[in-house]
Image: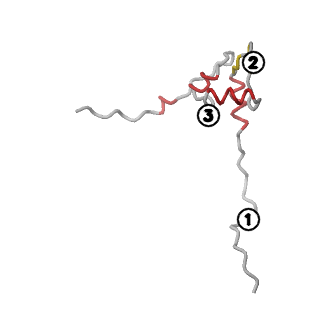
Amino acid sequence: MTLPEPPPTPAQFEIPPLDPLKRYSPEQVADNHYMPYSARMLREKAYKQEIYHHKDGGRITFTAEDILRNSRLGAVEPFIEPKAGRSRRQPARAAA
């Protein structure tokens, strides 16, 4: 009887560091999980000009700066403090 494999460690899921001078293909970006999209979605978003990218000789590529700028596109800033007076809505009462 063989023992089950141990669960993966966080080190196995580390993202490789980005080289600032290298150009990454959509496949490399998707395989390394630099962005949460498949290679096909990256191409579609690039064709629609929804994300930062380069067209080197007609090929879609990404630099480290493009990847960082794209990660900031969907960032949501938390609010500092809740607005006063906001509570759950009370159901409307029927007029008697």
Assign the C terminus to one quadrant of the image.
bottom right
Q: Residue at x 68, y 26 (%)?
A: 43
Please say which color scheme the image uses: secondary structure
> In the rendered image, which quarter is residue 89 located in?
bottom right
For numbered disc 3, what is the local secondary structure? Answer: loop
Q: Find the residue positioned furthest to the bottom.
A: 96
Q: Residue at x 67, y 17 (%)?
A: 23
For numbered disc 1, what is the local secondary structure? Answer: loop
Residue 91 position, x and y percent, is: 69, 73
Q: Amino acid at mark 1?
A: Arg
Q: Find the residue positioned furthest to the left.
A: 1
For numbered disc 2, what is the local secondary structure? Answer: strand
Mark 3 highlights which residue? 36
Mark 1 highlights which residue? 86
Q: Is residue 21 above or below residue 10?
A: above
Q: Amino acid at mark 2?
A: Lys
Crowd class of label 2 (few under 14; some 14 to 19; many from 20; radius 10 Å): few
Q: Amino acid at mark 3?
A: Pro
State the mark number for residue 21. Answer: none
Give the mark nearest the N terminus, 2 or 3: 3
Mark 2 highlights which residue? 55
Q: Is residue 12 above or below residue 21?
A: below
Spatial CA distance of label 2 from label 3 is 21 Å
